[in-house]
Image (cartoon, helix red, strand yellow):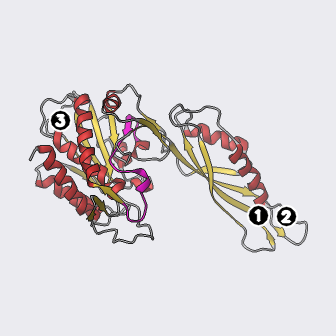
């Protein structure tokens, strides 16, 4: 058995253990323990902060640039339509079923296998850093962002962030800003001409949101997208509501900062508009970057991703890439093909061989 075959076998067995262990966001301590055990069994030094686990190659050289291999080990809670036990790693017809198998366990173990492939190498032109992060599914502050803010990690030249992309190259990713809005009116009796209906004021603002188009269009990600996803007002039928709250989901491209999008919203609506955060920014990597060119040479294609990942908290150039299919994420009876893991490890290694050796 070759080293790569052994690493692939180990990765699949590790994924089965991770699936069998609940690891909801902020509750990843037990899968963190499993990852610790994986490193200890191989005598690979590692560090842990809360539920983030990271390690670097044996011959780490501060004079060299560093590539980050990152994916997350937290999961969402099971979709209520599961027909299987979400914590039972069942293999059937070449598929490995289980919660987190596709998002993003297959990516995590494939990147970990890739890290182990390079761990002992002495001929690298880059250091290799592996991070299994927590709280990715809730964009939490105690995940990868914590390690970056507290400078636990070395400076990163570029990153591969493992998310299910069918091993195609997501060279750009939209940022996310959630904006909570309040339209103010005046309460009154619905039977008389009293009050100032906050719902009607909110409707005016929502009509602007649904009809407005930001003029600058990203060549990879397309337009900025705003969607009103939550609305709430009123407590009883005969009272004109004095407030109406609604939430805007803003998917922002590299053509605008989150602050610019927020300023445009505030200029054009009468409601109060307050962002939950301006942390989750757009990310990208140039198509002429060596890691992207390596993927293209292997027959992969590029695209822009509308969904967010740990890329949003990185300041370096980053590529989203991993085995599995995004459409399976967060679904009932989630699965990943075992062959996807094998191919994922193989492609990661082939691309990095063209980039870091």
In the picture, the disc for residue 195 is 2
Q: Are marks 3 and 1 in contact (CB under 8 Å)?
A: no
**Considering depth in this image, is 210 or 185 the residue closer to the camera?**
210
**Considering depth in this image, is 231 or 193 the residue closer to the camera?**
231
Which badge, 2 or 3, is on the more N-terminal residue?
3
Q: Relative to residue 138, is residue 285 depicted above or below?
A: above
In the picture, the disc for residue 270 is none
Question: In the orientation shown, which residue stands out farthest toward the front?
Answer: 93
Determine whether the residue tagged by mark 3 lies in a helix, strand or loop: loop
| Residue 331, percent from left and from top | 43, 61
Which badge, 2 or 1, is on the more N-terminal residue?
2
| Separation of residues labelled 3 and 1 (CA atoms) | 61 Å
Which badge, 3 or 1, is on the more N-terminal residue?
3
Q: Name the residue carrying label 1.
A: 242
Question: In the orientation shown, which residue stands out farthest toward the left?
Answer: 1
| Separation of residues labelled 2 and 3 (CA atoms) | 68 Å
37 left or right of 280 in image: left
39 left or right of 271 in image: left
In the picture, the disc for residue 60 is 3
| Residue 83, percent from left and from top | 39, 72
Tell me if residue 19 is in the magenta stretch. Answer: no
| Separation of residues labelled 2 and 1 (CA atoms) | 8 Å
Q: Relative to residue 184, is residue 352 depicted above or below?
A: above
Residue at horizontal 45 percent and vertical 71 percent from the top: 80
For label 2, the crowd category at 10 Å Cα-Cα, with few meaning under 14, some 14 to 19 and many 20 or more, is some
Task: Name the quadrant of the C terminus.
Answer: top left
For label 3, the crowd category at 10 Å Cα-Cα, with few meaning under 14, some 14 to 19 and many 20 or more, is some
74 left or right of 348 in image: right
| Residue 301, percent from left and from top | 39, 35
Please tell me how many numbered marks the rendered image carries: 3
| Main SS category, magenta section | loop
């Amino acid at each position: 058995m070759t080293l790569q075959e052994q690493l692939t076998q180990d990765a699949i067995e590790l994924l089965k253990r991770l699936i069998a262990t609940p690891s909801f966001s902020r509750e990843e301590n037990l899968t963190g323990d499993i990852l610790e055990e994986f490193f200890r069994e191989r005598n690979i030094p590692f560090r842990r902060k809360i539920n983030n686990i990271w390690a670097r190659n044996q011959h780490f050289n501060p004079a060299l640039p560093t590539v980050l291999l990152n994916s997350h080990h937290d999961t969402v809670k099971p979709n209520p339509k599961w027909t299987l036990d979400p914590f039972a790693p069942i293999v059937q017809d070449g598929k490995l079923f289980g919660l987190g198998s596709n998002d993003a366990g297959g990516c995590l173990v494939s990147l970990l296998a890739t890290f182990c492939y390079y761990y002992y190498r002495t001929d690298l032109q880059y250091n290799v850093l592996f991070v299994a992060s927590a709280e990715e599914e809730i964009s939490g502050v105690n995940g990868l962002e914590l390690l970056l803010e507290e400078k636990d990690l070395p400076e990163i030249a570029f990153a591969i962030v493992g998310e299910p992309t069918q091993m195609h190259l997501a060279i750009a990713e939209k940022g996310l800003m959630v904006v909570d809005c309040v339209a103010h009116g005046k309460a009154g009796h619905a039977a008389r001409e009293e009050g100032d209906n906050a719902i009607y004021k909110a409707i005016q603002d929502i009509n602007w949101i649904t009809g407005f188009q930001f003029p600058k269009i990203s060549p990879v990600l397309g337009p900025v997208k705003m969607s009103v996803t939550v609305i709430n007002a009123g407590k009883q039928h005969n009272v004109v509501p004095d407030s109406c709250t609604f939430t805007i989901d803003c998917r922002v491209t590299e053509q605008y900062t989150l602050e610019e999008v927020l300023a445009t919203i505030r200029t054009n609506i009468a409601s109060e508009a307050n962002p939950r955060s301006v942390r989750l920014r757009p990310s990208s990597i140039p198509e002429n970057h060596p890691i992207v060119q390596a993927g293209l040479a292997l027959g992969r294609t590029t695209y822009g991703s509308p969904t967010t990942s740990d890329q949003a908290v990185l300041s370096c150039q980053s590529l989203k890439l991993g085995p599995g299919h995004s459409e399976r994420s967060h679904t009932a009876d989630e699965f990943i093909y075992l062959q996807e893991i094998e191919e994922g490890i193989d492609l990661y290694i082939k691309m990095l061989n063209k980039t870091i050796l």
